[in-house]
Image (tube, rainbow, N blue to C red):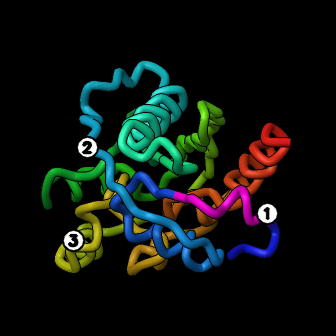
């Protein structure tokens, strides 16, 4: 259990995500939770407003989980990378990963995570966190070697800040855990709001 939140708020937690990074973050915080990956088709969400779309997708994933686990308090999230107005999801293969990393090279980009906290009977808190990440200039050999590790293939923006790609980062402005996939400070703020709603 986490010492900063009540037993009531964390007794029936469910993570609606297959992400091992999100599972690890929650475990390190002391939470006990069920995992139920979402089957939501992310391609059906329009991306005219990326921040609102990330929030909407997190909410849809949470509601999808709520339909099968209505008594659970559900954490759902969706992370995207924004570079010069372009949304970057997970690369489809090595060529797209190389394109993404080349686009990020030497530039600042934003990592946006939409996060949904859904609790019975139908309490919903939907928010988003944004972190600025500054990449140093990468050469083609570095990009090829990184792709050969296979680390980029299930990551938004084709990199993992906690992995080999940590060598690419000049600095960040914001929540590091948001770049990993789950903004911890934001999540705790949402939990505290939920506690207030339950009183």
Give residue 147's mark.
3
In the depicted view, which residue is nearer to us: 61 or 177? 61
The stretch of residues the image draws in magenta is: 5-13
The picture places residue 55, in percent across and down from the top left corner, at 52, 33
Q: Residue at x 38, y 70 (%)?
A: 20
**For residue 94, what is the image quadrant?**
bottom left
| SS state under label 3 | helix
Mark with earlier residue (3, 2): 2
The residue that label 1 is drawn on is 6
The picture places residue 141, in percent across and down from the top left corner, at 23, 75
Q: CA distance from mark 1 to mark 3?
A: 43 Å
**For residue 142, what is the image quadrant?**
bottom left
> Is residue 12 a member of the stretch shown in magenta?
yes
- Look at the image and tell me whether residue 69 can be seen: yes
Q: Residue at x 26, y 25 (%)?
A: 44
The residue that label 2 is drawn on is 39
Q: Which quadrant does the C terminus fall into?
A: top right
């Amino acid at each position: 259990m986490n010492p900063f939140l009540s037993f009531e708020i964390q007794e029936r937690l469910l993570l609606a995500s297959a992400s091992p990074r999100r599972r690890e973050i929650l475990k390190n915080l002391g939470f006990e939770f069920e995992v139920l990956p979402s089957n939501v088709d992310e391609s059906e969400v329009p991306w005219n407003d990326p921040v609102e779309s990330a929030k909407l997708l997190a909410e849809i994933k949470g509601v999808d989980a709520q339909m099968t686990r209505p008594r659970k308090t559900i954490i759902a999230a969706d992370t995207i990378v924004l570079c010069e107005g372009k949304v970057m999801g997970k690369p489809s293969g090595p060529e797209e990963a190389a394109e993404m990393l080349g686009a990020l090279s030497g530039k600042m980009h934003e990592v946006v995570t939409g996060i949904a906290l859904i609790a019975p009977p139908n309490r919903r808190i939907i928010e988003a966190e944004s972190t600025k990440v500054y990449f140093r200039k990468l050469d083609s050999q570095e990009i090829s070697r990184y792709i050969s590790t296979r680390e980029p293939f299930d990551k938004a923006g084709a990199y993992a800040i906690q992995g080999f790609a940590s060598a690419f980062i000049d600095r960040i402005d914001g929540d590091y855990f948001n770049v990993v996939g789950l903004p911890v400070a934001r999540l705790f703020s949402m939990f505290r709001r939920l506690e207030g709603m339950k009183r």
